[in-house]
Image: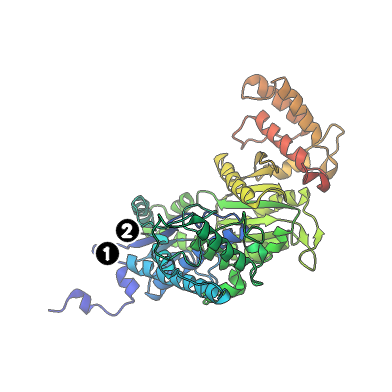
Amino acid sequence: MVSALQSMPAQPLGAIAGKDGLGNNLFTVVTFAPVQGFIGSSRKLRDLYGSSLLLSVLAKAIAGDASERGFEVLSPALVNTARGTPNLLVIRGAYKKGHGRDALQATWGRILKATRQWIESSLPQFEYDWESSWKQWHTHAWEYFHAQGESITQARRHLALAKQARAWSGINWTGESSTLAGHDAIARPLMGQVEDPRKLKPADADLQARAFIAALRALPALGEAFAGGGESGVGGEQPSLPELVKRLVTYPVVAKTAFSDERLVDVLPRRFDAIANSTAVAWFMADGDEVGTYLQSKADGAAEAEAEALKSFSSAMRRWAEGLYDAVPKHTQHKGTVVYAGGDDLLGALHDRPGPEGSEIAEPLSSGDLLAWLQAFPSLWSQHGQGITVSMGLVYASRQVPQREALQQVRQAEASAKAHGRNRFALRLLFSGGQAIEWVCPWSELPRLMEGFRDRDQRSGPQAHWGHLASDVAALQGRRALGGSGAEAQAVAQGLWKIYFPGLEPPKAIDQPLGEWISDLAQVLSRLLKPVRQQVRA
């Protein structure tokens, strides 16, 4: 007897696998995450880029494996480079869990092998006994999650349940922990030696780790900026193995082997020196609002319509994001750099315009550049053609503010923009003592405010003195006449608005009492809109 399957005409594996026993379409959703905090523990911009790069390359490996097996990858859309590939994949068909996990492990293994071989060949003066540690990180670095459903929405619900279960094993180690995340053993050449913990001399291990990092810093291909610390390494960074890999893969000497399937120009960071050399930096982080709700509205409850909507959306956003690496510098006259763009989310910085030699400053970043960027971004965002709004955090920091602090603050600022209603930006000024002030504003209000503001002398535009508004706000707050949502406070706020924004309707899309919103506005813009030489010291 010939089975029904045997009598079917030949079809691609994915076409057969895309049907369950009831004849309904199946969808597979896959994601992965680091077991420990080596991806999230990013003190340097290079670490942050390395984290994004690793996630993107591994996600592309899974997507490529699914495509080679005849499955259609609905999201992320495949483009020429791995850069910016999100680590959440939606695949049409019953793509097997083991296939995706094997693709991830194989690619991760190649990255580890390339990094390890480069270290050992570049630093032959050390004796190495650490192969077992590298093998453990090959096997136990990532959690891999996989779920299926008759619709994408159902598959995602199943994935959320799967992520609640533990999918990892910890790695045992002796000695001190990394100074970055603090979770894992410090990388050193003899870290794989089997030793009795009672006989382990912490001082010896510490000296070995410091000598190792100092030797890496001394390599011309890396330089002293590779890891903090003096010549002896005292007080410097002591990363774990995966943290070391995350940083090393951003250097061409390692990346050319670790990412042999990618063009280096597409994956390596560009012009980060412009950020490092800038006297002041404004970090921006943006993310699309309620993407899932938007896609469900396009699908109208039909599984196939949902799949086509996701496919179209992912393709449009990936093409748009890939173009940002050139579009942002162009829009900002080379005062802006995109660190990564993964579709509807991106991270970048505004900075001084570098001179011809790179280390020089041709033109410093000004407050006008920040406001010009905020006014230009909605138009840039709309170019992807998708009907979603965006929220952004923008943090302006002087050079004295540690980069780690600024990056943490920009994440918080983006979250604040979403918490205040989405479709808006949160502009935060960050000072060297760790203090910050913030103003959250809907995108549509900023051009009105800049055009409609009049100071006490009826000056407008660049000549206007925002300090007039700030001093009146301070005086009213001193008399407790402006805060709160009571009728009297609202009347005072309305009166103040009419004085400084004559003929302009108060904003309606804010989630704060008008008086509080004006107070935030006055604090931020009165400090921001000053001569550049005063801004950085504010």
**Disc 2 on helix, strand or loop?**
loop
Q: Secondary structure at mark 1?
A: loop
Is residue 109 at all visible to an observer of this figure? yes
Where 490 falls versus 193 (above or below)? above
* Residue at the right extreme of this rendering: 457
Q: Which residue is mark 2?
A: 150
Residue at position x 38%, y 67% from top?
100
Q: Amino acid at mark 2?
A: Glu
Q: Give the crowd class for mark 1: few <14, some 14-19, many >=20 residues within 10 Å.
A: some
Q: Nearer the viewer, residue 456 or 429?
A: 429
Q: Position of residue 385 (x, y in %)?
A: 58, 59
Tell whether label 1 touches label 2 (CB within 8 Å): yes
Residue named by callout 1: 20
Q: Percent from the top left, x then y, of residue 415?
A: 56, 44
How many other residues sit within 10 Å of disc 2, few (<14), some (14-19) or many (≥20)? Answer: many
Q: Nearer the viewer, residue 209 or 369?
A: 209
Residue visible at 32% across and 74% down? 13
* Residue 435 lies in quadrant: top right
Classify residue 523 as left or right of residue 242: right
Residue for point 57% across, 58% down: 48
Q: In the rendered view, does 493 fall on the left or right side of 164? A: right
In this picture, residue 496 sits left or right of residue 180: right
Q: Position of residue 124 (x, y in %)?
A: 55, 76
Q: Is residue 240 left or right of residue 471?
A: left
